[in-house]
Each structure stands twice: as structure tokens, then as C-alpha cells.
Image: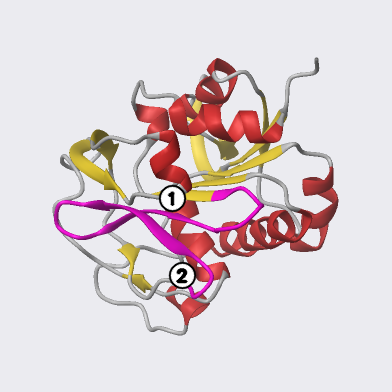
């Protein structure tokens, strides 16, 4: 049986390695390693023409929208606040197009951190532009407990409260009408969202690629198989 092909979106950033310094498509190695450990084949998807999203998604068995820069507030009808980071407009446009193509085609979709936020925005939700307490320090993952909502897909995957690696300063504000919240942090922050029904679309606010709990990624790979 062929292993499911899972596309994972990437950053596009200036980078340096060896004798080279130039723009690069980047992705922390934890993402493809987690896909591979869960039984999938990882294909990296750097920002591209949004018009190509449908064609790209048609070649995939599953899609992961990775973490990264803040979503530009104009995408959900807001002005940037003082602590909102610089926009990544190419990523926003590309990843929103990928999300919409995956939802139309029924391709299993997992949004991680920024990816969960983009899923909410793609479906008409909004974001809190800054909150405290969800990082361990600059460049250091924090950890906190998330509690699943009974009866949700996430609760089927991870039925108990669990500690997760976290690094974000934005979160869901108004939840899109078609999504349901499926986990919360102790402070009430929405930590997982999902699209109910026959399709498979889940977003988690934390970073499973930075931990050792494979259940979320394994569930995506099973759905893609």
C-alpha cells in the first residue's frame, strides 16, 4: 500500500548556510520528521501562485499548513496593532488558497499554530492580535495543558487533558461559523478547531512537531491513506 503524500507549507525567508546567503524555502525539520514518523511521505510546498493551489492539492493525499508569521490583519478586516508582526503576504495568499482548495476537494487538512489561525480566517473568523503566556521565552517553546471538548474529532484522537508545546501570541477571536472549538487552554484560549461532518479538517494552536505525541499527525495520515 502506497504511503500517503502529505504536503507541508514552508517559510520563504533570507537564510545563510555554508558559504551561501540568499532567500530560501525553510521549514523546521520537526514537521517532515513527524509526517514521516506517522507513516506519510512529506512534500514541501513553498509559496507559489495561488492560482496553482487547486492543481497542487489534487496531487496530495493530505495537507499541513505550518506555523510561522502572524496573519496580516487585513485578511480578517482589522488594522495591525503595535505588537503584530510584519506581514508574510505571499504565504498568506498561497496558504489561504491551499486551505480553500483542500476544503472544496475534501483533502484531509491539518493547520498548526498559524495554520489553525488561517483556517479560521479562511472561513470568516477573526484573530486576537496579542496575548501573553503562551511562549516559554523568545525562541523557546512553552508548555501548557489543553482540555478536549467531548464529542469532537480532536477528543476522539486525544481524549484526555494533555500538556502541549506552545509558541504563539495570537489566537482565535471570533470563531468562524462553520468551525467548532474542540480544545481549550486553562485560560480559555481556543486551542483546537475543526470542521464537523464527513470531511477531515483540524487545526491545533500548539506545535506537535516540537513534542513527542504523534496522535494528531497520525490521525491526519490515516485520514489521507
Mark found first going from the N terminus, 1 or 2: 2
- Which quadrant of the structure image shows residue 98? bottom right
Which residue is pictured at 68% across the width and 39% down the height? Answer: 62
Name the element at disc 2: loop
The x, y position of residue 176, in whole percent, is: 48, 73
Image coordinates of residue 152 in percent, x first then y, are 43, 50
Q: How many marks?
A: 2
Residue 99 at x, y percent in the picture = 64, 57
Q: Which residues are magenta?
A: 176-201
The residue under the point 37% across, 38% down is: 207
Classify mark 1: helix, strand or loop.
Answer: loop
Pointer 2 residue = 72
Q: Is residue 27 above or below residue 122?
A: above
28 left or right of 205 in image: right
Closest to the observer, 31 or 17: 31
Q: Is residue 175 magenta?
A: no
Callout 1 touching callout 2 (CB < 8 Å): no
Amino acid at each position: 500500500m502506497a504511503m500517503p503524500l502529505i504536503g507541508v507549507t514552508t517559510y520563504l525567508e533570507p537564510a545563510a548556510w555554508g558559504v551561501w546567503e540568499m532567500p530560501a524555502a525553510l521549514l523546521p525539520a520537526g514537521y517532515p520528521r513527524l509526517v514521516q514518523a506517522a507513516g506519510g511521505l512529506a512534500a514541501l510546498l513553498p509559496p507559489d501562485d495561488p492560482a496553482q493551489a487547486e492543481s497542487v492539492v489534487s496531487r496530495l493525499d493530505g495537507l499541513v499548513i505550518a506555523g510561522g508569521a502572524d496573519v496580516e490583519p487585513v485578511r480578517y478586516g482589522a488594522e495591525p496593532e503595535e505588537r503584530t508582526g510584519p506581514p508574510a503576504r505571499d504565504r498568506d495568499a498561497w496558504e489561504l488558497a491551499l486551505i480553500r482548495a483542500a476544503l472544496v476537494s475534501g483533502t484531509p487538512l491539518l493547520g498548526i499554530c498559524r495554520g489553525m489561525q488561517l483556517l479560521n480566517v479562511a472561513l470568516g473568523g477573526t484573530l486576537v492580535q496579542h496575548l501573553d503566556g503562551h511562549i516559554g521565552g523568545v525562541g523557546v517553546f512553552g508548555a501548557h495543558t489543553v482540555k478536549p471538548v467531548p464529542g469532537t474529532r480532536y477528543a476522539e484522537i486525544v481524549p484526555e487533558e494533555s500538556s502541549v508545546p506552545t509558541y504563539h501570541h495570537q489566537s482565535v477571536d471570533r470563531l468562524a461559523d462553520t468551525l467548532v472549538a474542540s480544545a481549550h487552554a486553562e485560560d480559555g484560549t481556543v486551542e483546537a478547531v475543526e470542521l464537523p461532518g464527513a470531511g477531515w479538517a483540524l487545526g491545533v494552536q500548539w506545535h506537535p512537531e516540537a513534542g513527542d505525541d504523534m496522535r494528531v499527525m497520525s490521525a491526519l495520515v490515516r485520514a489521507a491513506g
